[in-house]
Amino acid sequence: MITGSIVALVTPLHSDSLDVDWDALKKLVEWHIESGTSSIVAVGTTGESATLDVSEHSAVIRMVVAQAAGRIPVIAGTGANSTREAIVLTKAAKEAGADACLLVTPYYNKPTQEGLYLHHRAIAEAVDIDQILYNVPGRTACDMQVETVLRLSAIDNIVGIKEATGDLQRAEQLVMQCPADFAVYSGDDHTACELMLLGGKGDISVTANVAPKLMSEMCSAALAGDAKTAAEIDSRLSAVHDAMFVEANPIPVKWAVSQMGLMDNALRLPMTGLSEKFHEQVLEALQSAGLLVVK
């Protein structure tokens, strides 16, 4: 089981061509491994999966897998609102060497709970790789209910869920009712510490893009039941959690990572750069957590 701080990795792009910046991607993977990150999610929401084409999607996964070289597990984002497309992406991720896949609920077309069950069951049956469900109704207009998660948790290679509602009552219900070998991960940095103290297994994190060491330490403390240490670190990162969502993810986090000198600040349309009115807030948050030295 994958546990701990799992970074939802940004995909660096060149600011001129908007092609993937492979050198910057390699350096980010190394930085995360050196900083104690437990696992990397490649081409998830934060990795701009929506604006990468299929060949780029697979190429990024292959590069992250190759650079990680077995030192930490790699989870590939392979969700789609077409079951057939999700199967194609998941097969490609397995061929690329990913350790597991993260599959967001189908967005836009608003399936029923039965449709959600059949969608994820079909992918699990088609591709023999560990699969993590991803529930983020704020982005998908689709909310996977606890009962549906419980049904899916009985399938051998559906091994966990990224629960990004921020609803701790729901998360605790999942922890209590799902099988012991089914991992409940936070997908909401603001409540991740509390979720892990309730029995969650880790945090699939946006904040970890700028604070990998602190997020690793916070997750380790929370998983060990050290509530005091975990809460202290989480408090230090509170302003960063807020700053990463002043505009739609990954707009703020890509700007923040660029300010740390790790990549260009580049996004593909329809995503745009961080609005100037938020620059000061993001900078102050990074500085307050000791992540950026004041020049």
Image (spheres, rainbow, N blue to C red):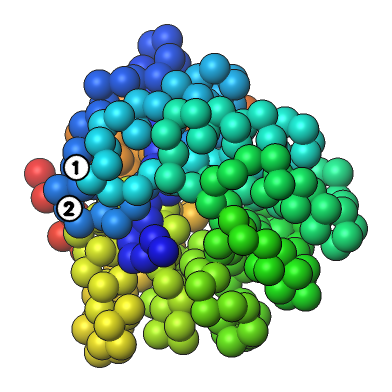
Q: Quarter-wise, where is residue 281 in the image?
A: bottom left
Percent across and percent down for residue 217 are: 22, 69
Q: Provide the secondary structure element on which disc 1 rests.
A: helix
Residue in front for this viewpoint, 39 or 87: 87
Q: Is residue 290 left or right of residue 279?
A: left
Do tag 1 and tag 2 residues touch (Cβ < 8 Å)?
A: yes
Q: CA distance from mark 1 to mark 2?
A: 6 Å
Q: Quarter-wise, where is residue 152 in the image?
A: bottom right
Q: Is residue 34 above or below residue 273?
A: below
Q: Is residue 2 above or below residue 233?
A: above
Q: Is residue 13 above or below residue 68?
A: above
Q: Is residue 30 above or below residue 32?
A: above
In which quadrant of the rendered image does the C terminus lie?
top left
Percent across and percent down for residue 113 are: 85, 62
Residue 252 seen in the current view: no
- Say which amino acid is labelled 2: Ser
Disc 1: which residue = 31
In which quadrant of the rendered image does the N terminus lie?
bottom left
Crowding at mark 1 (Cα within 10 Å: few <14, some 14-19, many 20+): some
Disc 2: which residue = 35
Query: In the orientation shown, which residue stands out farthest toward the top?
Result: 17
- Say which amino acid is labelled 1: Trp
Q: Residue at x 39, y 44 (%)?
A: 74
Percent across and percent down for residue 3 are: 37, 65
Residue in front for this viewpoint, 222 or 208: 222
Q: Residue at x 44, y 39 (%)?
A: 98
Residue in front for this viewpoint, 249 or 128: 128
